[in-house]
Image (cartoon, rainbow, N blue to C red):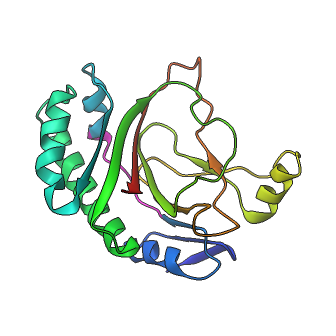
């Protein structure tokens, strides 16, 4: 079942909603799901951000190497994370009709990207595995922000939700979003971002 939030957004607990990003006028799609609580164990050790470009066919092996080098300990939570990132990458590449992508897995502790904005990409997949999810605006509030006004309602992805945000290279009405303000709160976010290479 797909819930229509606004003519430019689609939200559903079914993964097939992600394909709706290709529809005319749709700038944001959200697959609602829950991240396993066991993932918290991944941040018990000191880890560093992982970022690389790769072809989809090489992704799983490269992810395993990069996570090991980044300090992610071998455990069930890491195995789940790798499998999930590979699955999401396959879906994203199929939807975007691409064979290569840029992957970024980072631990966020600051107010990174704290201003509402649209990305300078065709589309970007974002999911927060741990911590607060990305905040986004419906079109009327996005227009208010562009006029220098405050939004009336700030929406937010939950941990585990997967969003594909259409960017400025694909539309004149990109999905407007920001990182949740968590600076000075002691919170950590484990964030995955996929872009076309």
Taking the image as shown, residue 6 lies to the left or right of residue 78, namely: right
Question: Percent from the top left, x then y, of residue 86?
Answer: 23, 57
Q: Tell me, yes or no, whether the highlighted magenta stretch contains residue 32.
A: yes
Residue range (magenta) = 31-38
Q: Tell me, yes or no, whether the highlighted magenta stretch contains residue 54.
A: no
- If the image is split into quadrants, where does the C terminus sit? bottom left
| Residue located at (57% from left, 20% from top) | 185
Q: From the viewer's perspective, is residue 71 above or below residue 75?
A: above
Secondary structure mainly formed by the magenta segment: loop
Question: Percent from the top left, x then y, of residue 10?
Answer: 57, 72
Taking the image as shown, residue 108 lies to the left or right of residue 49, namely: right
Taking the image as shown, residue 44 lies to the left or right of residue 6, namely: left
State the image quarter where residue 38 is shown.
top left
Q: From the viewer's perspective, is residue 163 above or below residue 179?
A: below
| Residue located at (28% from left, 38% from top) | 39
| Residue located at (35% from left, 75% from top) | 97
Question: Percent from the top left, x then y, of residue 23?
Answer: 55, 82
Between 85 and 44, which is closer to the camera in this rendering? 85
Between 30 and 1, which is closer to the camera in this rendering? 30
Question: Percent from the top left, x then y, of residue 27?
Answer: 61, 68
What is the tally of numbered marks visible in this picture? 0
Taking the image as shown, residue 84 lies to the left or right of residue 68, namely: right
Q: From the viewer's perspective, is residue 170 above or below residue 44?
A: below
């Amino acid at each position: 079942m797909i819930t229509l939030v606004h003519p430019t957004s689609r939200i559903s607990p079914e993964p097939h909603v992600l394909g709706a990003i290709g529809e005319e006028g749709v700038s944001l799609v959200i697959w609602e799901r829950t991240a396993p609580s066991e993932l918290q164990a991944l941040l018990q050790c000191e880890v560093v951000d992982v970022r690389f470009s790769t072809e989809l066919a090489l992704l799983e092996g490269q992810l395993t190497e990069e996570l090991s080098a980044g300090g992610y300990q071998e455990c069930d939570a890491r195995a789940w994370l790798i499998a999930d990132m590979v699955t999401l990458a396959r879906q994203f590449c199929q939807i975007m009709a691409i064979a290569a992508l840029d992957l970024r897995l980072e631990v966020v502790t600051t107010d990174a990207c704290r201003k509402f904005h649209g990305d300078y990409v065709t589309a970007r997949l974002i999911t927060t595995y741990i911590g607060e999810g990305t905040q986004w605006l419906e079109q009327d509030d996005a227009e208010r922000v562009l006029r220098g006004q405050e939004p009336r309602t700030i929406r937010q992805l939950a941990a585990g939700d997967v969003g594909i945000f259409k960017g400025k290279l694909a539309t004149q009405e990109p999905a407007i979003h920001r990182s949740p303000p968590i600076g000075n709160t002691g919170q950590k976010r484990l964030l995955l971002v996929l872009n076309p290479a």
